[in-house]
Image: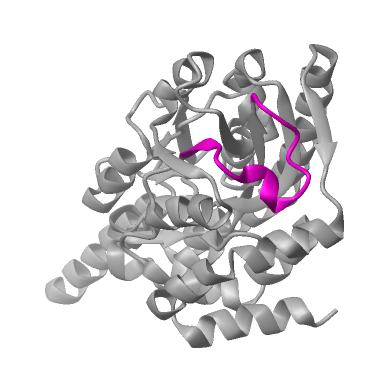
Amino acid sequence: MKLKFAAQCAGLVLSAMLGASAHAEINAKFAVTLSEKTHQGQGVARFVELVDKKTQGRIKIKPFYNGALGNDVQVTSALQGGTIDFTVPQTSTLTGMVKELEILDFPFLFSNEQEAEKVLDGATGQKLLDKLPAKGLVGLTYWENGFFNATNSKLPIQKWEDFQGLKFRAVQAKISQETVKALGANPVPLAVPELYTALETRTVDGQGTPSAVTAALKLNEVQKYLSLTKHSYGAFVPLVSKKFWDGLPAADQAILREAAIETRAFQRGVAREQAKSAEAAMAAKGLLINDITPAERRRMQTQVKPVWDMFAKDVGTDLVAEVVGQLATK
C-alpha cells in the first residue's frame, strides 16, 4: 500500500513538473541588422507581437536592432551555436552553407513580386528551407528585401549597353561580380560602409540595392540616376536556432511558424510601400528615375545568361529547370 501511495505521489509531482514546464516563460533574443523603422525591422516587431499574443506572453522575444549583436554572418553563426535564437538575413548570407539557395541570386530571375512569391511560397521554397536544419538553422518562411535597382553618376541606364565601362559596386559573392561583368561593367567589390565615400569620390560610378536601402544610405546624395533595372531580388529568411527550436514543444514550434507566415504579407507590403515612398522622396530631391521596358529587361536577361550557365551546376540543373518551369506557367 505504501509503495502504491508513493508511486501515485511521484506521478503527481512529475505531472505537475511537466505542466509547469509546458507553461514556463521562454525568453529569446532576435538579432536584426536594420533599424526598427525599416521593412525588416517592422516585420520583426510584428512577429514578436504576434508570438506574444498567441502565447499570452509566455514566449518573450527581445529584438536587438541596428546590428547590435553583429552582422548577418556573425549572428547566423551565433544561431548555429545557440547563443542567439532568431535572426532574419537575406538568403545570399546562407549560400555558403546551402548552395541551392544561390538560385535566388540568379540575375533577372523574377520579373515581379508575384513571380517571387510563386516560387518562394510553394514547394520549391520549402524544399530550400528543408536544407537548413542540417546546418543548425530552421527557416520559418520568406519575407522581402525587394528588387535591386541600379544607380550611377553618369547616365540613365535604359539598355544593357549603358552598363558598358561603368565601375559598378559588387558584393563579395562571385555571382554578383560575374553579373556585373556580363553586363559590361567593371565590378568593384565593396562593403556597405565604404560605399558612400566611394561613390562620392567617383572611385565607383554606380551600385545596385533596393530603392529603400539606397534612400536609407543616402546614396542619392552622391548619385544622379536611378534606373529601375530589377536585376536581382532579395528575400529575407526569418531563422531560428535549431538548438533553441529543438527545446520547444511542437505546439510552440507551430506558433512560431504560424506567426512568421502571418507576418509575411504585412512585411512584404511594408517593403513595397517603402520602395515607392523612397523613390518619390529621392526624386523630389533631384534624383532622376527611369523605368526599363519589358523588351530591354529581356535583352538584359539574355546578356546575363552565361552567369546562369556558370552557376547552374552548383545549385543543380534540376532545380534551375524546376524554377524556370514554374515561372513559365501562368
x, y (%) of residue 61? 46, 36
Q: Is residue 280 magenta?
A: no
x, y (%) of residue 219? 60, 20
Q: Is residue 38 visible?
A: no
Instruction: Indicate whether 202 appears above or below 270.
Output: above
> Front-most of 174 and 238?
174
Instruction: Indicate whether 226 appears above or below 310.
Output: above
Q: Quadrant of the N terminus?
A: bottom left
Position of residue 247 in the picture relative to residue 171 (left or right): left
Q: Quadrant of the C terminus?
A: bottom right
Position of residue 180 in the picture relative to residue 325 (left or right): left
Q: Kindly identify the residue that appears in the image at 46 percent across and 23 percent down.
A: 66
Position of residue 208 in the picture relative to residue 198 (left or right): right
> Front-most of 150 and 92?
150
* Quarter of the image where one finds residue 50: top right
Q: Kindly identify the residue that appears in the image at 24 percent across and 63 percent down.
A: 9
Query: Which span of residues is magenta-colored?
Result: 153-169
Q: Residue lying furthest bottom in this view?
A: 318
